[in-house]
Amino acid sequence: MQIGAEECTNIVVTVENRELTCRAPGGTGANVTVSLSVNDVPSPNYDIFQYRPPSIDAVSSPRTQGGPVTLTGANFGPEGSSRIGSVRLPNLNPHPHPHRLGFT
């Protein structure tokens, strides 16, 4: 099973021949293609998957002009992303906490 160009992981059949679950790969966007192959026979592709939009719960204030800012929230997209929506974030620093993003 694939979502976009990435393979799902932890695939579990929950209802024989009818339903399965998986861990979706990191990503962003709506109308993302979902595809499945069974015994090397591919299904039609469906543009039905949608990642949740990013949300910001808190913003730290920089202590000095030009100092670091930390956004705390969820659904910031895959690691290494340099944008939140259409806003380009310069000097992006990955934060050790998965729901925080720091930039200067």
Image (tube, rainbow, N blue to C red):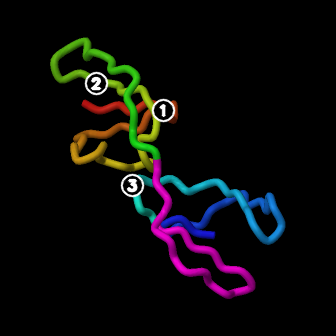
Return the mark for residue 29: 3
Residue wearing tag 2: 68
Return the mark for residue 99: 1
Q: Left or right? Give the position of 12 relative to 30.
A: right
Residues at marks 2 and 1, CA–CA distance in whole angstroms: 16 Å
Q: Residue at x 37, y 20 (%)?
A: 58
Q: Is residue 71 above or below residue 45?
A: above
Observer-side mark, 2 or 1, equals: 1
| Quadrant of the rendering where the N terminus is positioned | bottom right
Residues at marks 3 and 1, CA–CA distance in whole angstroms: 18 Å
Label 1 element class = loop
- Are the residues flagged by discs 3 and 2 in contact, CB closer than 8 Å? no
Residue 55: quarter of image: top left
Tell me which label, 3 or 1, sits earlier in the chain: 3
Return the mark for residue 69: none
Question: Label 1 amino acid?
Answer: His
User: Closer to the camera, 30 or 2?
Assistant: 30
User: Closer to the camera, 38 or 58?
Assistant: 38
Q: Residue at x 45, y 50 (%)?
A: 78
Residue 70: quarter of image: top left
Question: Label 2 amino acid?
Answer: Pro
Label 2 element class = loop
Counting other residues with Cα less than 10 Å from the Cα at mark 3, is it few (<14), some (14-19), or many (20 or more)? few
Q: Left or right? Give the position of 22 relative to 6.
A: right
Question: Label 3 amino acid?
Answer: Gly
Q: How many marks?
A: 3
Tell me which label, 2 or 1, sits earlier in the chain: 2
Please report the bounds of the magenta region as a residue range: 33-51
- Are the residues flagged by discs 3 and 1 in contact, CB closer than 8 Å? no
Residue 104: quarter of image: top left
Tell me which label, 3 or 2, sits earlier in the chain: 3
**Residue furthest to the top:** 63
